[in-house]
Image (spheres, rainbow, N blue to C red):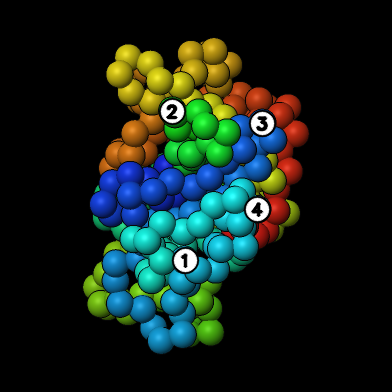
Amino acid sequence: MNALLVRVGADQSLGGGKWNGLVDSRSGQFVYVPIPETQRLYPGFEKPYTTLVPSLSTFGRQLPPQLDQKFMHLDPDFDHLTYGDRGQRAKQLVQHLNPGDLIVFYAGLSDVNGEKRLIYAIIGVFVVESFTLATAVAVDCRHCNAHSRRILQPETDDIIIRARIGLSGRLLRCIPIGEWRNRAYRVRDALLQEWGGLSVKDGYLQRSVRLPRFNDAERFMKWFKANNPGLVQTNN
């Protein structure tokens, strides 16, 4: 078994929307907030940020002004159990993963309880079912992923991964994994040892083109199952 650790969700960069999803560090409940969409979409496939308002209101928060009129690049899409990517990251996904392997999604979340540091946490897991080019997705399935919702050129190399139903989804409660160490957010030392390590130096967690690989995916999965994660097929 192979497994990759993939960072997703809004962040403080310009391309990330200059915001973060929300988490209640006491309960583990969170709001999954995707990055903004930057490409042209097929009409009717837009995913407005305003659809997050009911989820945000349960935390007593509102959308920031910079996202209020924008659309989401909703990827991964936990409703449809799909994940898309392009360029070097897409190549790594195809190179390192096969059906039955894992994608572990994590995000940097803002704690509604006032903690100043971000809460880096696992928010979802996919067991890979299949790969397909986004340009090859059937017309009646284009709505299932952010990359197939885009109007793409025929030569575009965007890929879409479908995950296995019943074994994949968004976590009901996120699992914190990060800490601020050596001037960066990193996976906690104790977890690195329990997982058997990652391919990146000292558990580095910043967004990067190079996707961290689990050195021992089976060991990670044993740890993950021991945390009794509840998985749901919904974005929020």
Give me the disc on residue 49.
Answer: 1
Residue receiving disc 4:
58
Residue 203, image x and y in percent?
A: 40, 22
- State the separation of the CA atoms marked 3 and 1: 26 Å
State the residue at coordinates (39%, 83%): 42
- The amino acid type, in three-letter code, at marker 4 is Thr
State the residue at coordinates (46%, 85%): 44
- State the separation of the CA atoms marked 4 and 1: 16 Å
Residue receiving disc 2:
117
Front residue of this view, candidates 200 and 129? 200
Quadrant location, the C terminus = bottom right
Lower position in the chain sequence, tag 3 or tag 1: 3
- The amino acid type, in three-letter code, at marker 2 is Arg
Specify whether 198 is left or right of 163: left
Quadrant location, the N terminus = top right
Residue 97, image x and y in percent?
A: 47, 45
Residue receiving disc 3:
26
Front residue of this view, candidates 61 and 69? 61
Lower position in the chain sequence, tag 4 or tag 1: 1
Residue 198, image x and y in percent?
A: 43, 24
